[in-house]
Amino acid sequence: MSDSRIPLYLITGFLDSGKTTLLIDTLGMDYFNDGQRTVLLLCEEGEVEYDQSQLSKQNCRVVPVESQDQLTTTFLEEIDRRYQPERVLLEYNGMWSIQTLRDCRLPKTWGLYQAIHVIDGTTFELYRNNMQSLIVDAVSEADMVLFNRCTPDMPLPGWKRSIRAVNRMCEIVFESPEGDEMEVEDILPYSLDASHIDLEDDDYGIWYLHVQDHPDLYVGKTITYTALAMTSHKLPKGTFIPGRNAMTCCEDDIRFFGFLCKYPQSRNLKKGQWVKVHATIQFEHADVYQEEGIVLYADQVELTDPPAEPLVYFR
C-alpha cells in the first residue's frame, strides 16, 4: 500500500467483545492522537460508549452505519467526499458477514492498513461452539487477533492453536482483565530434548502448527506418525504429502494439512492410503511452497490402519 493512501483500520468482533474499548485506548495514544481528521464508521453500539466531546478534541467524527446494506462503495465514496478523512476506523458488526467487506471496493484513495479481530476470553467458548463459522471468517482476514479478559486458568494454548489453524500469519495477543499482555507458552505432548518424536495420533495438529512456528527446534530430528498419503502427478517425482484432514470450523470446512515428503518409492503409494511414516525433518526451499518450508525425508513408509479419530481438531 502506498503511504499516500488514507489508512483504514478494521476492527471486528462480537458485541461487547471490547472493540470500543480498544478504539478509545488507541485514539488516546500519542502516535494516534495527532490531530488528523478521523472518521469512525460505527456499525453497532455496545455497553461502552464514546465520549463525543473527547472525540471532537481528537478531531474524530462518528458516522453510524445502520445496516449491512449501507456498506457500499458509493457510501464510502460519499464519506470520503463529505469528511475528507486522513484516517478511517471501521468498528464492524460481529454478526455481519465479512463477505460484505470483500465485495465492497474501497475508494481509490483508501487502503486497508490493519485488521484486528477482538475476542472476549470469557465468552469465546460459547461463541466458538455456536457461531464458529463467523469467527473463522473474521479471523482469516485479521492481521492481529486480540484475546482480552483472559485468566491463567483458561485453555489459552489451545485457543492459540485454533487461531493458527485458520490464519498462520496473524499476530495473536492475550490480555488479562487489567489489560496487561500475557505470555502464552505452547504446551507440547512430546519432548523437544529427544532426537526422535513418536507422535501420537491426537497430537498431529499440535506438531503441525508448532513445527512451522519453530522449525529451528526440529531440524535434524526424526519423527514417526500416521498419515493419509496424498499423491499427485503435479508433485515432484519421488515425493508425496503425508498429512491429515482437519476441521477448522465445521463439517463443511475440512482441510488437508501436510508437508512435502521426499520418498523414492512414493510411486508405489496410492492416494488416500493410511501410512506410518518415519522421516527426518528439514527446513528448506521447495518449489511446491515457492519458499522455504518443512520438508520430510522418509526412509520408511508402511501401510497401516487409520486412527480411531481420523479428523484432527485444533483445540
Image: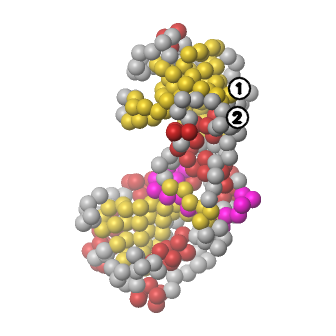
Q: Kindly indicate the quadrant of the structure image that contains residue 110.
A: bottom left
Which numbered circle lies on residue 307? 1
The residue shown at (41%, 88%) is 57
The residue shown at (61%, 37%) is 207
Against 12, residue 200 (above or below) is: above
Specify which label sits upstream in the sequence, 1 or 2.
2
- Residue 40 appears in the picture as rendered: yes
- Asked if residue 176 lies left or right of residue 110, the reply is right
* Residue at image mark 2: 202
Instruction: Rate crowding at label 1 as few (under 14), some (14 to 19) or many (20 or more) other CA atoms within 10 Å.
Output: few
Q: Is residue 176 magenta?
A: no
Q: Is residue 138 magenta?
A: yes
Against 96, residue 191 (above or below) is: above
Q: Which residues are magenta?
A: 136-154
- Residue 228 appears in the picture as rendered: no
Q: Position of residue 315 (x, y in %)?
A: 67, 45
Instruction: Rate crowding at label 2 as few (under 14), some (14 to 19) or many (20 or more) other CA atoms within 10 Å.
Output: some
Against 307, residue 102 (above or below) is: below
Which numbered circle lies on residue 66? none
**Helix, strand or loop status at disc 1:** loop
The residue shown at (37%, 62%) is 113
The residue shown at (51%, 22%) is 297
Q: Position of residue 276 (x, y in %)?
A: 64, 19
Whether residues under marks 1 and 2 lie with C-beta atoms below 8 angstroms apart, the answer is: yes
**Helix, strand or loop status at disc 2:** helix
Q: Kindly indicate the quadrant of the structure image that contains residue 226.
A: top right
Of residue 164 and residue 270, the one placed in the foreground of this image is 164
The CA span between labels 1 and 2 is 9 Å
